[in-house]
Image: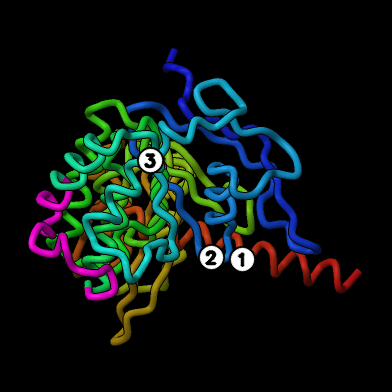
Amino acid sequence: MPPRPLLELESVSKRFGDLQAVDALSFGVRAGEVFGFLGPNGAGKTTTLRMVMGITRPDEGRILFDGSADLDRGRVGYLPEERGLYPDAPVLDTLIYFGELRGMRAGAARKAAREWLERFELTDRAGHKVNTLSKGNQQKLQLAGAVLHRPALAVLDEPFSGLDPLNQELAMHIMRELCRQGTAVLLSAHQLDLVERLADRFLLLSRGRTLFGGTLDEVRRAATGGADLVVRVELTALAGLDPVERAVATVIPEARFEREALGDGRQALEIAVPPGRDLAPLLAAIAAHAVVHGVDTQRLPLHELYVRAVESDREARRTLASEVADG
């Protein structure tokens, strides 16, 4: 049995007037893992993170930190999406202040601040005012302020914003280091290629509700109806694609299909394949009815899973709205 999550949300809901921002949301984040908290703009992510931090309160449900409804702010680090820096304050003093806010003694906060400025290559800016820093360096300063006290839980809202690729790698390295030391990282970001490399588990939110959750392999299987592999075939079907799909279904009855027109009489056929299947009979079935121009196999990346799930959810909502309007 996995250990109890350090952070738990149980059927949490939040409404603003007629807007249901978060709807019966439940998940947990364990110590030593990165949890990717994903969703399109307006999905309810920032509202959820604000509730986790106690900035706003849920209308229903409960949020537990280490089994308690009381958040121990000294053990939590928070990076908000919006800038939370004092523009006229010196860089070093800013970090020391953040450390003291989180319960560090002045000497320990100063020592940690200097260490983090060195790690983020900002030592030469220690005496400069915050407003003289570039957007990327301000983001590094704010990220350092969120984690310099080595929190048990780090809540990071868009930590890669404004960072160049080298500093994105540095930020990921620091998150992995925190996890190795036992920190639970709740990460919300739109850079899905980075999140895929970093996170142990994921949750995708849309209109305040969960679309999928779990490890990447679990999400793939859920998004593709139990498949963990997609075979993409570029072909010229001699009599259309229907015979091809029927032939494939005879050897893999659970296969699912998506078509794409490529022009010049060619089409692409994506076939979602259940785990552990031999692909040779599938390719033979295709070749009996079509001229094959190329074959590619892939495990769907997080970006594709995200797009498919959100688009499917939006289409389902449009269909429901149309049915309601039609009575």
For badge 2, the amino acid type reads Glu
Name which residue lies at 38% across and 57% down.
189
Q: Which residues are magenta?
A: 116-132
Instruction: Tell me how many marks there are.
Output: 3
Return the residue at label 2. 311
Q: State yes or no: discs 1 and 3 in contact (Cβ < 8 Å).
A: no
Name which residue lies at 32% across and 31% down.
183
Residue 77, image quadrant: top left
Return the residue at label 3. 154
Color scheme of the displayed model: rainbow
Local crowd at mark 2 within 10 Å, few (<14), some, or many (≥20)?
Answer: few
Confirm whether the magenta stretch covers residue 48: no
Name which residue lies at 29% across and 26% down.
182
Local crowd at mark 1 within 10 Å, few (<14), some, or many (≥20)?
Answer: some
Which of the marked residues, 2 or 3, is nearer the chain's N terminus?
Answer: 3
Residue 293, image quadrant: bottom left
For badge 1, the amino acid type reads Arg
Q: What kind of element bears circle 1? A: helix
Position of 233 relative to 48 (above/below): below
Confirm whether the magenta stretch covers residue 125: yes
Position of 5 relative to 325 (above/below): above
Picture disc at residue 314: 1
Q: CA distance from mark 2 to mark 3?
A: 30 Å
